[in-house]
Image (cartoon, rainbow, N blue to C red):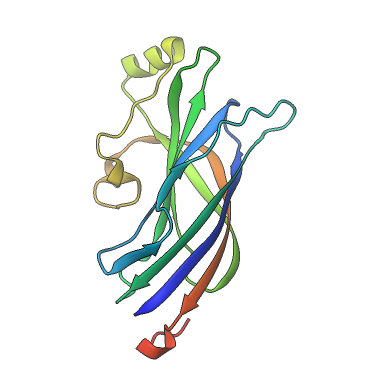
Amino acid sequence: MAEVHIIGQLTGASEFPDHRLFCKWGIHAGGAWKLIAGSKDGQTQVDNPQNEEFAAFCHPIDLHYATKGLQGWPRLHVQIWHHDAFGRNELYAYGFVHIPSSPGPHEVECMTWKPNGTFKEELMQYFVGGCPQLKNPELIYSGADRYKLHTTAMGKVHAQLNVILRNFDKFGIES
């Protein structure tokens, strides 16, 4: 079987409206993909930068997949959360990006978005906090019904990923 190694880190997040951010992340791959080693999801620590707009995570990612086909190429999906001064965690944004399919080092930027609520929900969010959340988190990376959502653009999540491909030439796949 062909193999893909993904080694790198979530470096941080930028352009969000507030500090004290952390990231819940995961890698989703199709049915032809088998995780051989590594953790396919995780969570970073909370970073509260004082004098800059970049929340640094430096959270490692190290995965090894085997695959029988290219369908369902791995995707990195993220949820950015805000830890407020009262100790509450509120969802800030969702996002996803495909893992690069070419071998070598890659600087990846994942654009994020948040779902819009009704007028009442937006008013409550302004005064009380919180944000509308997806009932089905698979909507983050699957295109099924995501086009029906009304969203607002948020910040970016930055990652440095090294992709290593092995045995793709034996199966007639040029990388």
Judge from the rendering whether residue 139 lies leftward or rightward of residue 16; answer left or right.
left
Q: Residue at x 36, y 29 (%)?
A: 116
Q: Residue at x 58, y 26 (%)?
A: 20
Judge from the rendering whether residue 34 lies leftward or rightward of residue 39; answer left or right.
left
Q: Residue furthest front?
A: 37
Q: Position of residue 53 (x, y in %)?
A: 68, 33
Closer to us: 151 or 100: 100
Note whether 163 is above or below 8 in the view shown: below
Note whether 67 is above or below 43 in the view shown: below
Closer to us: 124 or 158: 158
Judge from the rendering whether residue 28 lies leftward or rightward of residue 163; answer left or right.
left
Is residue 26 in view? no
Quadrant in the rendering for residue 150: top left
Q: Position of residue 121 (x, y in %)?
A: 33, 18
Q: Residue at x 71, y 25 (%)?
A: 50
Quadrant in the rendering for residue 38: bottom left
Q: Residue at x 34, y 51 (%)?
A: 141
Q: Position of residue 147 (x, y in %)?
A: 30, 46
Note whether 76 is above or below 136 in the view shown: below
Closer to us: 32 or 14: 32
